Image: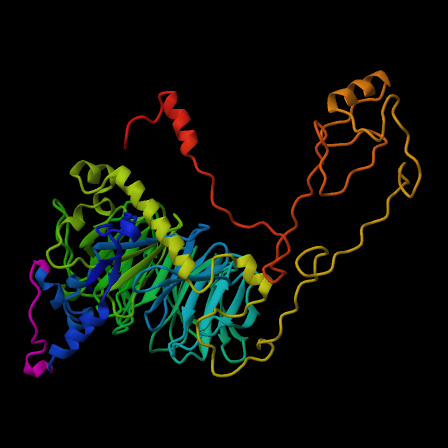
């Protein structure tokens, strides 16, 4: 999709001629204009299809870009080779799951801290954050009707969420961590996969388990429901892929092809004819459900494959994420063998498709340095023009296809690495550090403009339900209505609350309640002595000197507005905490301008420092 930078670049003066600080560029997608351009120029297929201008490798043809839906048979044009933006939370945690909202306006991420984070789908800036679970979130799934969201965590707990992220129900589904879940085609049921080696099918409306699918000999790591049929697929730590009938809880068949733990299984959503699996044996396989056998063997990864996903528009485009942070894109109808590798034949083109070996397919595009650590989750935008990735390096990244005429995208640090990119001049280590600082500054500005600040403690203390700024559902959920929040108990002496009486003294002090206090020899009470003279008198009388900040024994403390002379300063009582809803005139600490550093700079310059102008 087309995108453009935004922000001030420091080419204009500020107020009173002052130079304004340059703000870093942020890529912004403009898919509305692209989709509108395609809808305006498309015609029926028998009339020629799309009648607009074809794209050419020049920047002037950016306006002629069309969405992936305009080219359903050209998957190569939708490969996301361009890095758009990297999003980081203020408090960074590994990102376990990334999911686009059904309308594609926001990206929802779930981390090991149990937090939901919403990122804008156009400017990729932070919007809001909330504490959703008490443990690490392992799975997220939107219903096909786009009305519900379910999440599962490391404690085996499942939660129902409305689109405004109002928690409706919690179900203790498993005693072990839940690794994956999926909705049925009509959203009436969902299935979970857990480390207890079982799959459970739940009735969504009742929130009750209907059946338990047992057959795996080890942890069940992943599960998926066919988009149109009553068919389940699961992958386990026992290296097996099983297909199930959810109505009878019976295993239909077992697919053998991997030699290690199955990390991800997913059905192809466009036609529903293929099944893709990945494992920790550095390979992924594509199975044809009509023949119940593997037809493609995906190679190229140097480390284990952690996740994979089909494109929502192109059924022959498959994306995989590796444990080493690599991101590969495969065109299943293009083997693309490297130099020195023999081209293999697809089973469909062989004499006996049932016994022919699977065709080896290598990636058509490689992002070998997409992340620093394992990629746990990937998700396509509903329009298919942006790919989001969440990784163990605590970063969420957005990718899209390059604009017409952009060729340097294949020489950035995500394709060839930092050292090679720095040698070719496409990446600067110092400039990247400066860019990272600018991105962090932009994130701070985004937080100031966001719906809710990333201070989850304040949200919990205020008892907030849902996310401010997002519309509530049609009706109130029993037990989760907008009730009055009970204010915390007042703190004595803070704000407008009345101060508590001081505690009584533990023992009587001399000089209080009219009792005469002892006098030091040689001390006239009518004439206050000099501090040096008072110290000399105390030494002659054998009275020990008091520690700093205290009074000599037998002296009455003066009023609060009178200070002792000399070396007997009174200890200052620390200021009380200030409540936002308290009295504005309670004498709390106010903001004041910082002291000038001009004199300090002049002193340093007299010593020969900071003399050269920058």
Comparing 550 with 519, the one in front is 519
Q: Using the image, determine if residue 605 lies above or below residue 472.
A: above
Provide the residue span drawn in magenta: 44-59
Q: Nearer the viewer, residue 320 or 356?
A: 320
Residue at 50 percent of width and 54 percent of height? 113
Residue 364, by quadrant, is: bottom left
Quadrant in which the N terminus is drawn: bottom left
x and y, in percent, of residue 453 in the image: 47, 59
Q: Quadrant of the C terminus?
A: top left
Residue 42 appears left or right of 7: left
Q: Residue reaching furthest right?
A: 515
Instruction: Residue 268: name its quadrant.
Output: bottom left
Q: Residue at horizontal 24%, vertical 44%?
A: 413
Does 400 sit left or right of 576 as displayed?
left
Q: Is residue 504 magenta?
A: no
Q: Residue at x 42, y 58 (%)?
A: 448
Q: Is residue 231 above or below residue 17?
A: below
Left or right: residue 43 versus residue 476 is left
What type of secondary structure mainly makes up the magenta span? loop
Q: Position of residue 283 (x, y in %)?
A: 29, 52
Q: Can residue 30 be seen in this snapshot?
A: yes
């Amino acid at each position: 999709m087309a995108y453009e930078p935004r922000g001030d670049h420091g080419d204009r003066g500020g107020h009173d001629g002052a130079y304004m600080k340059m703000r870093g560029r942020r890529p912004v997608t403009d898919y509305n204009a692209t989709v509108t351009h395609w809808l305006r120029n498309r015609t029926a297929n028998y009339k020629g299809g799309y009648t607009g201008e074809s794209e050419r490798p020049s920047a002037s043809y950016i306006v002629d870009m069309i969405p992936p839906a305009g080219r359903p048979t050209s998957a190569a044009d939708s490969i996301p080779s361009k890095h758009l933006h990297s999003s980081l939370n203020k408090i960074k945690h590994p990102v376990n799951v990334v999911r686009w909202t059904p309308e594609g306006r926001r990206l929802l991420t779930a981390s090991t801290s149990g937090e939901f984070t919403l990122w804008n789908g156009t400017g990729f800036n932070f919007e809001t954050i909330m504490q959703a679970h008490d443990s690490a979130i392992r799975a997220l799934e939107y219903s096909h009707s786009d009305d519900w969201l379910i999440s599962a965590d490391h404690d085996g707990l499942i939660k129902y969420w409305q689109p405004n992220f109002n928690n409706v129900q919690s179900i203790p589904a498993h005693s072990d961590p839940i690794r994956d879940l999926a909705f049925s085609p009509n959203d009436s049921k969902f299935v979970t996969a857990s480390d207890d080696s079982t799959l459970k099918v739940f009735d969504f409306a009742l929130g009750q388990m209907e059946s338990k699918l047992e057959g795996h000999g080890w942890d069940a790591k992943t599960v998926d429901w066919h988009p149109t049929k009553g068919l389940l697929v699961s992958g386990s730590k026992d290296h097996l892929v099983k297909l199930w009938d959810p109505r009878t809880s019976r295993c239909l068949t077992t697919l053998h092809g991997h030699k290690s733990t199955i990390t991800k299984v997913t059905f192809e959503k466009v036609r529903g004819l293929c099944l893709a699996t990945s494992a920790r044996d550095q390979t992924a396989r594509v199975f044809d459900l009509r023949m119940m056998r593997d037809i493609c063997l995906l190679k190229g990864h140097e480390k284990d494959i952690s996740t994979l996903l089909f494109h929502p528009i192109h059924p022959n485009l498959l994306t995989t994420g590796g444990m080493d942070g690599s991101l590969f894109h495969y065109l299943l109808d293009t083997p693309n063998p490297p130099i020195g590798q023999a081209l293999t034949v697809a089973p469909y083109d062989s004499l006996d498709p049932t016994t022919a070996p699977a065709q080896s397919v290598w990636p058509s595009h490689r992002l070998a340095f997409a992340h620093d650590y394992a990629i746990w989750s990937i998700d396509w935008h509903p329009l298919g023009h942006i790919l989001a990735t969440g990784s163990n390096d605590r970063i969420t990244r957005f990718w899209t296809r390059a604009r017409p005429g952009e060729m340097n995208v294949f020489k950035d640090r995500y394709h060839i690495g930092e050292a090679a990119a720095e040698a070719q001049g496409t990446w600067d280590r110092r400039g990247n550090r400066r860019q990272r600082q600018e991105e962090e500054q932009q994130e701070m500005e985004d937080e100031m403009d966001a719906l809710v600040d990333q201070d989850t403690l304040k949200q919990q203390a205020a008892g907030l339900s849902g996310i401010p700024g997002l519309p509530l559902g049609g009706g109130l959920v029993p037990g989760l209505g907008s009730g009055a929040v009970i204010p915390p108990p007042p703190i004595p002496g803070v704000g407008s609350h009345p101060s508590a009486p001081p505690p009584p003294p533990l023992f009587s002090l001399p000089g209080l309640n009219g009792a005469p206090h002892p006098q030091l020899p040689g001390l006239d009470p009518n004439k206050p002595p000099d501090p040096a003279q008072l110290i000399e008198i105390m030494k002659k009388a054998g009275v020990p000197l008091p520690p700093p900040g205290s009074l000599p024994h037998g002296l009455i403390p003066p009023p609060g507005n009178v200070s002792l002379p000399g070396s007997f300063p009174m200890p200052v009582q620390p200021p009380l905490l200030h409540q936002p809803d308290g009295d504005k005139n309670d004498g709390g600490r106010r903001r004041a301008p910082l002291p000038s550093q001009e004199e300090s700079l002049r002193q340093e310059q007299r010593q020969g420092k900071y003399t050269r102008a920058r």
